[in-house]
Amino acid sequence: MNDNASDHRARAAWLDDEDFGWRARIGVIVPSRGWTPDHEWPRMLPRGVSLFFTRIPLLATTAADLEAMGKHAVAAAELLASAEVDVICYGCTVETMMKGLDYDREVEAQLSRVSGRSAVTMTGAVLKAIEAFAPRKIAVVTPYIDELNRLERKFFADVGIDVCHLTGLGIANTVEIARIAPSEVTTLGRAALSAAGDADLLFLSCGNLRTLEAIPELEAALGKPVISSNQALIWSALRKVGIADKDIGVGSLFQR
C-alpha cells in the first residue's frame, strides 16, 4: 500500500461516524480574514469534538472595521445554531475588549439568547483564563495598532489587572498578522517578559496570531504561564460542554 492510501485510511478512521462530534460540536465565529483559528483549533481538540466555522466580514484590524464586523455576529450565531452545535464561540479578542467588560458580557448573552446555545466570547475566555492564575501583573504582546493597544490596556485596568508592559506591532492588515511566524512570537514573548520584569503571566493577544508552537516553548524557558486568545477560547468552550481533559490543548492553562 502506498503512503497516500495509508494516509487516506488513517484519515477515514479519524472521521468515522462514531467519532464525528459524539462528545461535542463547537461553533466558531471568526473574522473573514482570519487564518489562524482554522489552523490551530483542530490541533488542540480531543477526539470526538467537531468544529463548525462561520465567518463575518472584516476588512482591517482597526476600531472602525472591527465595530462594523461585530454587527454580523448575531446572524452568524443563528447560522451556527441551525447546525445544532452545542456551544458558540465568538472568535475575536479586541472587538468586544475595546468596548469594555459590560459590552463583552452583553454580546455573550445576546449570542446565547438568539441561538438558544451556550456562548462564550474570546475576551470573556481570556479574562477567565488569566484569573485562573490570579496574577498581580501581566505582560502583553499584540499585533495591533496603537489605538487598539490603548483600548486593550484600558480594558485590563478597568477589570483590575495591571499591565506592566505591552508590546504592539502596529499591524492593521489582518492577514499579515497570521503571517507572523511562531518563532517571532516566541522572541517577542521573551522580550516582553524581560522588559516587564516582575510580570506573573504573559498574554499573547489576537485570535489570528500564531501561538500554538510558542506557548510551550515560552513556558518552559520562562517558568511562567502563557495565555493566548485561541488557547483560552478553546479551554473555555470545552469546559462549557463539560470536557475538562488535561491531556489536550497546549500550555499550563489546560492543567488548571
Image (cartoon, grey):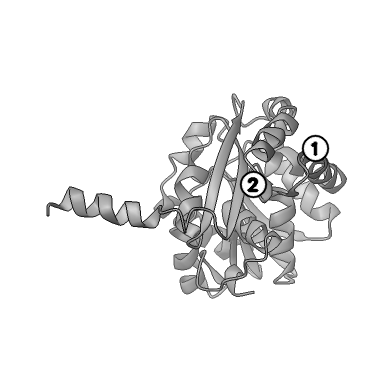
Instruction: Pick the quarter of the image with the C terminus.
Output: bottom right
Relative placement, left or right, of 1 versus 76 is left
Q: Residue at x 72, y 29 (%)?
A: 75
Q: Amino acid at mark 1?
A: Val
- The reply to whether discs 1 and 2 touch (Cβ–Cβ < 8 Å) is no
Left or right position of 182 against 62: left
Q: Which mark is residue 85?
A: 2
Mark carried by residue 114: 1
C-alpha distance separating marks 1 and 2: 13 Å
Question: What is the quadrant of the N terminus in the image?
Answer: bottom left
Q: Can residue 211 be seen in this snapshot?
A: yes
Q: Position of residue 41 (x, y in %)?
A: 51, 51
User: In the displayed structure, would residue 49 be above or below residue 103?
Assistant: below
Residue at the extreme right of the image, as rendered: 102
Vertical position of residue 224 compared to residue 109: above or below: below
| 164 shown above or below 134 | above
Does label 1 or label 2 sit earlier along the sequence? 2
Determine whether, in the image, residue 156 is placed left or right of residue 202: right
Q: Secondary structure at mark 1?
A: helix
Q: Which kind of residue does numbered mark 2 sit on?
A: Val
Instruction: Name the foreground residue: 188 vs 126.
Output: 126
User: Residue 195 occupies which quadrant of the picture?
Assistant: bottom right
Residue located at (64% from left, 46% from top): 85
Residue 239 is marked as none
Classify 243 as above or below 212. below
Residue 114: give x, y in percent of width and height: 80, 37
In the picture, residue 131 is in which quadrant?
bottom right
Q: Position of residue 9 (x, y in %)?
A: 27, 53
Tell me, yes or no, if residue 169 can be seen here: no
Structural crowding at the residue carrying mark 1, measured as other residues with C-alpha within 10 Å and reported as few (<14), some (14–19) or many (≥20): few
- Which image quarter: residue 197? bottom right
In the picture, measured across the screen, residue 115 lies left or right of residue 27, that is right
